Image (cartoon, rainbow, N blue to C red):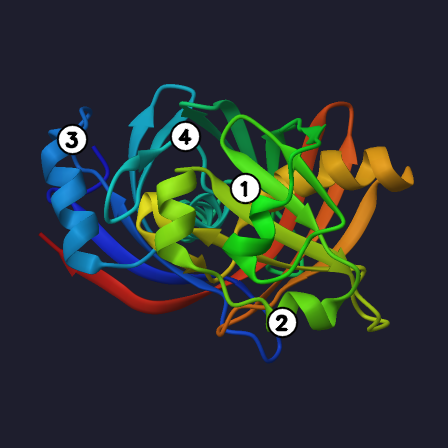
Amino acid sequence: MIFEKDVFYCINAFVGEKLFGNMAYVCILSSNNFPEKSYMLAKAREFNVSETVFVKKEKDGFYIRWFTPECEVDLCGHGTLAVSYVIFCIFDDLSKIKFHSLSGSLYATKNIDSSITLDFPMRKSAKISNIALFEGLLGFMPLEVYKGNDFYICLFKDENQILEISPCFNNIKAFTLADIIVTAEYSDADFDIVSRVFAPGTGIDEDDVTGSAHVALAYFLNKKTGKTYWNALQRSVSGGELKVFLQDNRVFITGKCQVLVSVLKT
């Protein structure tokens, strides 16, 4: 048992020098068992951010679960980064964490510059031919579209189009519950790719910074370019930056966090 009561932290994940990242609420559970799913979903709706994360201690690490205001999801990058940051602060002698999750084993490593590197399984996708409907969903016709288990990747010609996209969220939600990731090469010397992520099917019209999307982008970009490393910028209102590395069917994502609220006890 870590605490006598469940403790919530509010963390911004994938922050940059002038970027605010993505907010997550992290709950470190006092019990060895998760509460009822209805309770966790109710908390996610109460906090009303893109992800509320619950974690409990296991013998060989931790078990992690992620909730949007509408549903439980299989994988969340910024939520995992936020949880990792909290655990490293609580257990300052730890340098690596193993997570059990619905997506298998995940890992987090603390770096000397205060950043954290996440280790996720690769998310594959395949090119689809019927892409005309995406113009109606996004306002622009993508060059190519790729589909994974629970996401689409839409490739556009440049970052200007990425910024100009004005999605029809109701139409996206009617079409799919999957995330729609839009991306292009970025011309700024500091970054290789730019992206935005739309997920109205899970209750998030536009996500601020999405680690799981960059897990998917790593496989997609490697197949297109042969590269294995990218400095990535997500251009939401808050914005965030990620370092992405692909090796041996695993994707490594590095980012930093900032504490917003340190302790909220239930």
Cβ–Cβ under 8 Å for marks 4 and 2: no
Residue kind at label 1, given as amino acid type: Ser
Circle 3 Cα neighbour tier, 10 Å, few/some/many (<14 / 14–19 / ≥20)? few
Camera sees residue 159: yes
- Measured as percent of width and height from the top left, residue 6 is found at 15, 45
Residue 130, labelled with which disc? none
Reading the image, the residue beneath label 2 is: 163
- Measured as percent of width and height from the top left, residue 68 is found at 30, 46
Horizontal side of residue 156 vs 215, given as left or right: right
- Nearer the N terminus, badge 3 or badge 4? 3
Q: Looking at the image, is 123 positioned above or below residue 214?
A: above
Horizontal side of residue 30 vs 231, given as left or right: left
**Is the N terminus in the top left, top right, bottom left or bottom right quadrant?**
top left
Reading the image, the residue beneath label 4 is: 74
- Nearer the N terminus, badge 1 or badge 2? 2
Dot 1: what SS? helix
Q: Nearer the viewer, residue 117 or 193?
A: 193
- Nearer the N terminus, badge 4 or badge 1? 4
- Nearer the N terminus, badge 3 or badge 1? 3
Q: CA distance from mark 4 to mark 1?
A: 10 Å
Residue occupying image coordinates x 62% and y 77%: 17
- Measured as percent of width and height from the top left, residue 138 is found at 55, 58
Residue kind at label 2, given as amino acid type: Leu
Residue 212, labelled with which disc? 1
Q: CA distance from mark 3 to mark 4?
A: 14 Å
Q: Nearer the viewer, residue 133 or 113?
A: 133
Residue kind at label 4, given as amino acid type: Asp
Reading the image, the residue beneath label 3 is: 37
Dot 2: what SS? helix
Cβ–Cβ under 8 Å for marks 3 and 1: no
